[in-house]
Image (spheres, grey):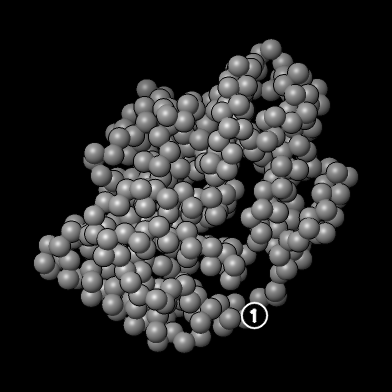
Amino acid sequence: MTGMVLRRSDPDDDALRAEAEQLRAVVRECAGSGIARRALLLGLSQLPEDLTRPHHLRLACAALDPLAAADRARRFGLPNGDIAIVWRGEAAAALRASLEAVVHLFTGEADRLPDPAALIRLFRLPEEAGPLLEAVEQSLLPSAGNAPAGSARAGRAPTSPLDPPALAALEGALAQADVARFVRRRQICERLPEGGFRLRWEKRGLSVAEIAAVLMPERAVRADPWLFRRLTRTLDRRMLALLTAPEELRGAGPFGLNLNIASILSPEFMRFDASLPGALRGQVVIDLLPADIMADPSAFLFARDFARDRGYRLLLHGITADLLEVFPLRRIGLDLMRLYWSPELARRDPDQALPDAAQIVLSRADTADALAWGREQGIKLYQGRAAVPGG
């Protein structure tokens, strides 16, 4: 196994280019000889700037350690900051452990990544040697995205990560702020048999990016995952308090919320539940993050059963093609899954079963390809620019 990994900030690009060439040689050897291998590409070059600080990158590298112990495993750092691992055999347990670690590392970030499916890509060799070689070639291209962090981003003003005193100040500002101006809504629509779409529910949420830009522009609020988790719980409380106001729910249609599991068990949720009009009982969808479920399974089970008893529908949020086998919807006991569209879905292993089509919300449905694939699978619910009423 190679020793060099994750040198995104290393000004000596020659070593990384050498590793990319080694990876290319391994993939070509598999293609030429028919040797079966699996490969994983962690696309760290896709991450926002405030998620590429050294401690994030170290944690991302460590998340792949289970796979690094697989049979004949070799790990490669690429010039654009991505990491690849090639190994022999399925190594299902190691793969699952690494995928879960990556998901936990980027909890709460699924909506923010340019393309979550690009963060984790799995390949079977030699069948998928071409796409992996293409990714290696892309990493070797001279571009701003492939330059070392210190040079590519030297023109940007540094942003300090959120720390406990800053978090306390931000929470204090949120307590006084009118958060209604930061509420954003997204449509989840149903495909009609005769064509077109109709609105099924609206997802409501506070824009973290806008709140940070207005209330604390000098801080990177997502840089520390644990402090950010604490912040999202504060935002949950503010959103629930906003919805408790009678004028917010009077005449409202079905809607959805992103909530932490701890928030479902909070006094603010109890007040929200008590104020929910009878017409909306059974019409509210709660989105849960996979990492939140894994962080405290017992709390999840309690919150799941409590919410279901009160008539809420529960949705597993932010699932990509590579995570389908890690989070089987039926075993988790949730009602719906928000599945991110990507070309990898169409290329997935045919033996890899999808949940029931009625349980899937196909998200990032922005293209005709996404809609065509969803139609083939019998999916009815969509979120994205290509799936809007009248479209």
Residue 136 shows in this picture: no
Q: x%, y% of residue 218?
A: 77, 66
Q: Relative to 105, is 155 on the left or the right?
A: right
Asked which quadrant contains residue 376, the reply is top left
Q: Residue at x 34, y 82 (%)?
A: 18
List the residue tagged with mark 1.
155
Going by the picture, which residue comes out furthest to the left? 33
Picture coordinates of residue 27 (x, y %)?
A: 23, 68
Residue 185 position, x and y percent, is 64, 38
Amino acid type, residue under disc 1 in the picture: Gly
Q: Residues within 10 Å of mark 1 (few under 14, many from 20)?
A: few
Observer-nearest residue: 104 or 137?
104
Q: Quadrant of residue 88?
A: bottom left
**Which residue lies at the image location 40% right of the left edge and 42% below the top edge?**
326
Describe residue 307's horizontal placement relative to residue 116 as left or right: right
The kind of secondary structure element at disc 1 is: loop
Quadrant, the N terminus: bottom left
Q: Can you give x and y, in whole percent of width and height, for residue 380 in the image?
A: 41, 28
- Residue 3 or 24: which is nearer the viewer? 3
Quadrant of residue 160 in the image? bottom right
Camera-nearest residue between 297 and 274: 297
Please tell me which residue is depicted at 48% across the width and 37% down the height of the picture. Answer: 338
